Amino acid sequence: MNKLHIKKGDTVIVLSGKDKGKKGKVLEVSPKEQKVIVEGINMVTKHVKPRKMGDVGGIVKVEGAMYACKVMAVCPKCGKPTRPAHKFLNDGSKERVCKNAGCGETF
């Protein structure tokens, strides 16, 4: 199974590593590799070669991929990190909800 608890567009907080405690928005998700790319987190240097006439090459800072188990989703209502729970609706569909006590906000 290649499922992740994080989706594109979620706000997440980093649990471990050099960027521990920082928040950011998920730009890309790769379920097959179990990795995510978060805006402004895990910045790496990349050497870029000019491809077309007039392009500028050089060293560029870009976001690197990190394992999804190192991040946790942040509830938009209470602002606390949470593991999303799933709530089944009457029409048979399900939605992700906050597990924190007294919140229960969907996201």
Image (cartoon, grey):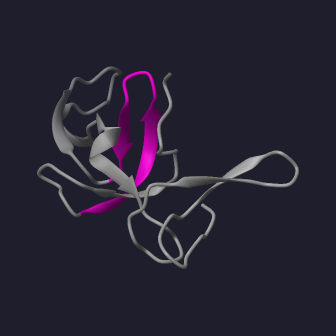
55 w.r.t. 37: above or below: above
Farthest residue to the right: give it.
91
Q: Is residue 59 visible?
A: no
Q: Quadrant of residue 27?
A: top left
- Which of 41 and 67 lies nearest the eye of the viewer? 67
The image shows residue 45, relative to residue 17, as above or below, that is: above
Rendered image quadrant of residue 96: bottom right
Membership of 98 in magenta stretch: no
For image coordinates 25% across by 63% down, the residue present is 22
For image coordinates 45% across by 36% down, the residue present is: 29
Image spot of residue 92 (x, y percent): 83, 45
Residue sticking out furthest to the left: 18
Q: Is residue 85 above or below residue 42?
A: below
Report the residue at 48% width, 43% height from top: 5
Query: Left or right: 12 with respect to 65?
Result: right
- From the top left corner, tell me how far across and down residue 82 is, in percent: 42, 61
Camera-side residue: 34 or 93?
A: 93
Whether residue 91 sits left or right of residue 5 in the image: it is: right
Q: How many marks?
A: 0
> In the picture shown, does residue 21 fall above or below 103?
above
Residue situated furthest front in the rendering: 101
Prevailing SS of the magenta stretch? strand
**Residue 51 x %, y %:** 32, 20
The quarter in which the C terminus is drawn is: bottom right
Judge by depth and name the residue closer to the eye, 22 or 74.
74
Q: Which residues are magenta?
A: 22-39
